[in-house]
Amino acid sequence: MRIVSYIAAALVLAFQAVPAEAEQIQGSQFSSGNWNGAAYTFDASGEFSHCAISASYKSGNTLYFSVTRDASVTVGVSGPALGLEEGMKFPVTLAVDRRKPFYGTATAVSSNLAFLTIADFDAAMTAFKKGYTLRIFANGGQGVYDLSGTFRALEAARNCAIIYYNHRSKPSTATTRNEVVDPAIGYQLATSMISDLGVTDARYLTKDELQQIELPGAVYWVSNDTGLSGGVMFFDVAEGYELRTHDAVATEYLSRDCEGDIASTVQQVDAEFPARQIRVLCLSDDRQYEAYLTNSLLEDVRMVTLLMHHSDVGGAAPERLKERSTDLALRNAKFVLDAE
């Protein structure tokens, strides 16, 4: 059975690495459960375009949603064996549970990719956030997709669009991440954190493990004996960047694995450079953790220092966890500035 794909042209560029029209905003990546997302700009103008999320399914297809600049919702699916013809248009019906279906005309961007945009923003967001199952009908075929986790993921995408709506960057094809700082420095900082906390069983995560927790390029360690974990990563930033634009994204990331009650705070850190700390406390039946993420702006580099304690793994948290997290972040920042 052929499953029709549909996705906004912007999403094609965002997730399929098709060149030309969209550029990911540096440091805008976020995740919620099995959904990953980021914010994008139009290459030609540098103006904010959309925030998009995606999730992969066992069928081999990927489902996408985006919240666009013009307050519409774009939905899409890509897959290796959809058999479409580039440029073709065809009617599509989207049915979520027993709700009123959405009708529209999809456009194939490639043989395995097409798009459909829904103008009724409120109705689309409500259906996709609160629904359980999405069925796609087109060209005599049907695709069925589980919508688990979309409530938080789409809310994160909406918040992302609010945060970056006024964003405008210089048209550019260059983006960097941890390459802006010598990788050896990341390991020095992480090792210093381990020593300061008195952790004796720490191990560094592999590249595959870092991908699983959505921290590619980070230097990150975990301790099963204490329930502590932490690490650092770096991002290049554009001129005029402000740290507060990442408050909501960081909060969403730290909350992504919590199925219970969540408490969060954001505060400015007293330092010689811009720094903000996000705290998330998760309390659920099978998982309890406290997380601190500190964003520090060191001239043209954003440094992230992360420290977490899982009380369901290692028992009681170390004393003054918040203060120790702040001290570690400031010490890391000073090290980087002195190294430069």
Image: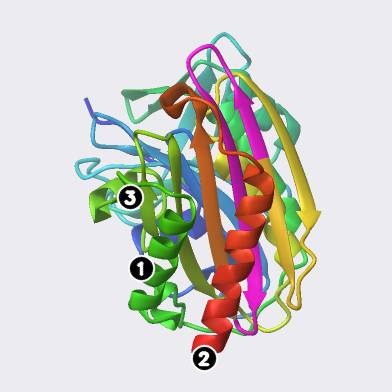
Nearer to us in this view, 101 or 184: 184
Q: State the image coordinates of residue 85 (x, y, percent, origin top left).
A: 28, 52
Residue 135 seen: no
Crowding near the residue tagged with mark 1, few <14, some 14–19, many ≥20 C-alpha atoms within 10 Å: some
Does label 2 or label 1 sit earlier along the sequence?
A: 1
- In which quarter of the view is residue 334 placed? bottom right
Work out whether 176 lies above or below 280.
below
Crowding near the residue tagged with mark 3, few <14, some 14–19, many ≥20 C-alpha atoms within 10 Å: few
Residue type at the position of mark 1: Tyr
Q: Is residue 291 magenta?
A: yes
* Residue shown at 49% from the left, 87% from the top: 339
Q: Magenta segment, which residues?
A: 280-300
Foreground disc of the pair 3, 2: 2
Q: As drawn, which residue projects farthest toward the bottom? A: 340
Mark 3 and 1 residues: CB-CB less than 8 Å, in contact? no
Q: State the image coordinates of residue 292 (x, y, percent, origin top left).
A: 61, 47
Q: Which residue is mark 2?
A: 340
Q: Label 1's element? A: helix
Q: State the image coordinates of residue 47 (x, y, percent, origin top left).
A: 68, 72
Q: Which residue is mark 3?
A: 211
Q: Label 2's element? A: loop
Work out whether 170 lies above or below 317.
below
Does label 3 or label 2 sit earlier along the sequence?
A: 3
Residue 141 image label: none
Left or right of 280, for residue 289: left
Q: Label 3's element? A: helix
Q: Calculate the distance from the C-alpha at mark 3 to the C-alpha at mark 2.
A: 29 Å
* Residue shown at 41% from the left, 49% from the top: 214
